[in-house]
């Protein structure tokens, strides 16, 4: 055996100070202030990063018919992974675990959709009549009330409001309509998402091993460890949002049922789905419940419904989440709202749905690579955009 030492592995992602021996300078550099040089250096690097991100987004939008089903399959896989992993750890055959997961999801979704369609068909005519009567009462109040408006003014305000709603709806639905402009696109995306889900559950490890081989050999350990940390974060995110969505749906739906608000079950299902868009989805779907109560049951029931929505949000955010998940390190709600809004502006509803998990994944990968924690396997000592790992509490010495 040779006595020569093996070369030490160098982290290709770790920044190293540039060598001053190879710095090229000209006489003109002496007249350029150092702050301006630093600013220029930062500027062109930022421009390159922005250009790369813009090209990536352009490619995603160009291939949206493939990207959206892929992201849907990955997110559903993250939702099913805790139960799927439990079955594997208890020595279930993989094919049986995959079949059980798919049949369970199909049964839950099919059952909820059946109940929603039944209740909507049963109560929609009555809600339409009540809505028309409420609109007429509001119009009469505006005509005879202290505002003393004319029918022309009311119609102008209605037209402006409808135009504003249409504009905002077109912004939100642009991404969804771009993906599903026809029934064929919807069916194709659904079939592709199911196929991706089956492949990920059946052979996700093999797919990832093949993906890692696309990286240079020296970068494979870092890419593998950082991506696994990001995937764990996406699973935690999905589990967290599933618990949050269930709590919001049960609380608001039960409150609507007890207050006599119509279509309580569709409202609960809508709240459950909307809660997967953090903060924004729960607020919008809760507003729909309050609006139904106002139109159908009157002002005081609407106030009570609003109190129920706010109470459920506070109970879920400040009591149940800490009890279920421990002291979680989370990003500020303002940042979540900005990420969701940016995703909606870029890709409509799909962008709003996938914005936070994508941002969480990218953030965890970047922090894991930058901190070098991929070599030790420990959690990075940095603030992450989403983490559900409880903090360790230090014991006080008495």
Image: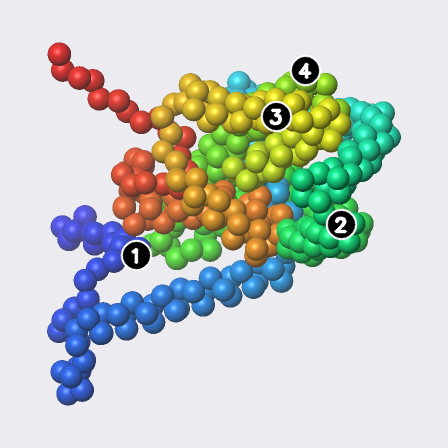
Inter-mark Cα distance, 4 to 1: 60 Å
The reply to whether residue 174 is visible in this rendering is no
Give the number of the disc on residue 150.
Answer: 2
The reply to whether residue 251 is visible in this rendering is yes
> Callout 2: helix, strand or loop?
loop
Closer to the camera in the image, 205 or 127 = 127
The residue wearing badge 1 is 12
Query: If the image is split into quadrants, where does the C terminus sit?
Result: top left
**Mark closer to the chain start, 3 or 1:** 1
The residue wearing badge 3 is 303
- Classify 10 Å Cα crowding around label 1: few (below 14), some (14-19), many (20 and above): few
Looking at the image, residue 231 lies above or below residue 35: above
Quick check: marks 2 and 4 in contact, CB under 8 Å? no
- Classify 10 Å Cα crowding around label 2: few (below 14), some (14-19), many (20 and above): few
Residue 81 in the image, given as x and y percentages of width and height: 54, 30
**Mark closer to the chain start, 4 or 1:** 1
Which residue lies at the image location 60% right of the left edge and 54% below the top edge? 347
Give the number of the disc on residue 258.
Answer: 4
Quick check: marks 2 and 1 in contact, CB under 8 Å? no
**Mark closer to the chain start, 4 or 3:** 4
Closer to the camera in the image, 217 or 52 = 52
Quick check: marks 4 and 3 in contact, CB under 8 Å? no
Which residue lies at the image location 53% right of the left edge and 18% below the top edge? 90
């Amino acid at each position: 055996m040779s006595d020569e030492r093996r070369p030490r592995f160098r982290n290709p992602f770790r920044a190293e100070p540039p060598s001053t021996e190879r710095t090229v300078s000209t006489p003109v550099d002496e007249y350029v202030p150092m702050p301006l040089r630093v600013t220029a250096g930062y500027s062109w690097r930022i421009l390159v990063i922005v250009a790369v991100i813009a090209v990536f987004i352009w490619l995603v939008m160009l291939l949206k018919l493939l990207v959206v089903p892929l992201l849907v399959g990955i997110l559903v896989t993250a939702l099913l992974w805790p139960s799927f992993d439990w079955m594997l750890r208890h020595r279930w055959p993989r094919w049986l675990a995959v079949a059980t997961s798919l049949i369970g999801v199909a049964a839950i979704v099919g059952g909820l959709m059946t109940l929603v369609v039944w209740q909507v068909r049963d109560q929609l005519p009555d809600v339409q009549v009540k809505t028309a009567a409420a609109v007429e009462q509001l119009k009469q109040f505006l005509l005879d009330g202290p505002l003393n408006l004319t029918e022309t003014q009311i119609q102008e305000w209605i037209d402006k409001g409808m135009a504003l709603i249409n504009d905002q709806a077109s912004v939100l639905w642009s991404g969804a309509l771009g993906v599903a402009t026809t029934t064929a696109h919807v069916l194709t995306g659904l079939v592709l998402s199911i196929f991706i889900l089956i492949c990920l559950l059946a052979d996700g490890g093999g797919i990832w091993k093949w993906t890692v081989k696309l990286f240079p050999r020296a970068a494979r350990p870092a890419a593998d460890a950082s991506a696994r940390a990001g995937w764990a974060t996406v699973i935690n995110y999905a589990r967290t949002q599933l618990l949050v969505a269930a709590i919001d749906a049960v609380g608001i739906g039960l409150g609507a049922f007890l207050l006599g608000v119509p279509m309580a079950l569709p409202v609960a299902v809508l709240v459950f789905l909307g809660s997967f868009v953090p903060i924004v989805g729960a607020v919008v779907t809760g507003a729909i419940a309050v609006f139904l109560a106002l139109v159908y049951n009157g002002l005081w029931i609407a106030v009570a419904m609003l109190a129920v929505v706010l109470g459920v949000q506070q109970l879920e955010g400040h009591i149940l989440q800490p009890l279920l998940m421990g002291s979680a390190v989370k990003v500020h709600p303002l940042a979540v709202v900005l990420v969701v809004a940016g995703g909606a502006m870029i890709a409509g509803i799909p962008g709003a749905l996938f914005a936070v998990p994508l941002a969480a994944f990218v953030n965890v990968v970047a922090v894991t690579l930058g901190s070098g924690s991929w070599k030790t396997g420990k959690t990075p000592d940095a603030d992450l955009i989403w983490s559900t790992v409880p903090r360790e509490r230090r014991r006080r010495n008495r």
